[in-house]
Amino acid sequence: MDEEDYRAIIAALAAELRAIGAEDVADEAHYIGVNSETGEPILILPQERLVAMLFAFERFLAVRDGEIGRKAIARLQQNVEGEGPMAAVLVTTEETVSDRAEIDLLDMPDLGQLRSRVRILAEQIGSRDIEPPPFLRA
Amino acid sequence: MIMDKKAAIKEIKNIFAGYKALTPKDSKVLKVLTDGKLYELFVLAHLIESLRMRGFTLAFKGTTLKFKASPGQIKTSDPHFEINAPDGSLLWLFVDIEFETLGSGAVGGAHDRSRRHEVDIVIVTVTKGYPLHDQIALGVECKAVANFSKSIVKEVLGVRRELSYFRDAQPSILSTLGGVPSVSLRAEPASEFWLAYTDAKGDQYSESPAAFGIEFKHLQP
């Protein structure tokens, strides 16, 4: 793949990210390096940028992965005297206290497989083709 | 496997289709995911394990851990952790709490919105109301953002300032209660303060805040 290919993939990825409300992951401001010859900030090369964006998306998924909540509860139970918490909820803010709802944090979807696919894709893309020029440091 | 542009775009579209299919449609449930509460739970588990390894004994009071969409004050009726220090002192751990700032105390009680700041996880020496800055033994700020940015550093520096004065190094509150290994901080009161984040880029911002007793923790699920 050449740089134009990587740019096309970045465009497709960024569009999908924005469609799910992950604008921040798509924001190019996070993918800036420095040209050591001029000191100027520049976008990192398309291949690296794509890989960095994919890993950022994996982190986006990680903090939404219900499995981390379920593992955290098990870890809490292992480190306290007695039973420890059996569940975890988010108490919403409403107009009145009686309207408050409790959302079960342990009932969130397991995103492990998707996260794995994103990591594999990032690693495949990152392992191919071009090396960054020596003047560029991320 | 050889990956070309077409295959890469196809895989991206498939991954996002899978995500959309799994993502809850209820906006309140969606808020759980966007608020970073799962990450807060993940960090809490890490902290509890860390405290146990430092010699503290912990017990959970309640059956269900309750995070709040809006932070508030400490109530003993809320589920919380009770912490017995090695020297026998008793402390409490609550989540999503606002504390009365150092600055507010310095001006005799601020009346505007600067009076209190939120901390995601706190260990305190009191069991009701809004804890004062000097009633906090440890605070944790959790940042569940995919990309770490300098604005996070500026934010935690501000919270640190509202917790403690800068002074010569001394053992942290938890260390004086027998926690090992001993942690030394240039802060008065010597509250420990963690910044937990998922993006390893955060590590690149840790050296200067460390002078003020802010411990950067790259905790990636």
Image: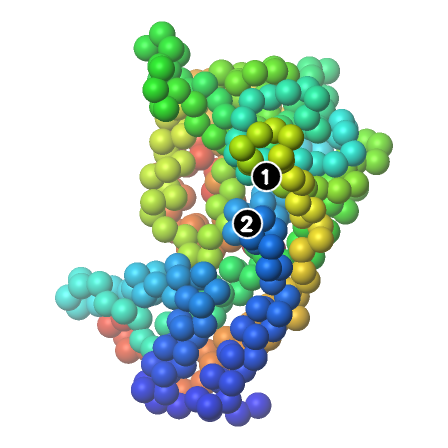
Q: Amino acid type of disc 2?
A: Lys
Q: How is the image coloured?
A: rainbow
- Seen in the picture, residue B125 relative to B149 is either above or below; the reply is above
Q: Position of residue B48 (x, y in %)?
A: 68, 36
Residue A35, quarter of picture:
bottom left
Residue B104, quarter of picture:
top left
For image coordinates 73% across by 45% down, the residue present is A73
Residue A120, quarter of picture:
bottom right
Report the chain holding disc 1: A
Q: Residues within 10 Å of mark 2 (few under 14, many from 20)?
A: some
Instruction: Assess whether mark 1 and mark 2 are in contact (beta carbons under 8 angstroms).
Output: yes
Which dot marks residue A112?
none
- Where the C terminus of chain A falls, by quadrant? bottom left
Q: Secondary structure at mark 2?
A: helix
For image coordinates 40% across by 87% down, the residue present is A129
Q: Amino acid type of disc 1?
A: Thr
Residue B41 versus residue B88: which sits nearer the camera? B41
Q: Answer left or right for B90 relative to B43.
A: right
- Where the N terminus of chain A falls, by quadrant? bottom left
**Residue that numbered label 1 is attached to:** A92
Q: Answer left or right for A70 relative to B16.
A: right
**Which residue occupies the extreme right position in the image?**
A82
Q: Secondary structure at mark 1?
A: loop
Residue A19 versus residue B74: which sits nearer the camera? A19
Q: Position of residue A121 (x, y in %)?
A: 53, 78
Same chain under badges 2 and 1? The reply is: no
Report the chain holding disc 2: B
Which dot marks residue B31?
2
Residue B193 versus residue B99: which sits nearer the camera? B99
For image coordinates 66% across by 70% down, the residue present is A113
Whether residue B164 is visible, yes or no, is no
Separation (CA) of disc 2 from disc 1: 9 Å
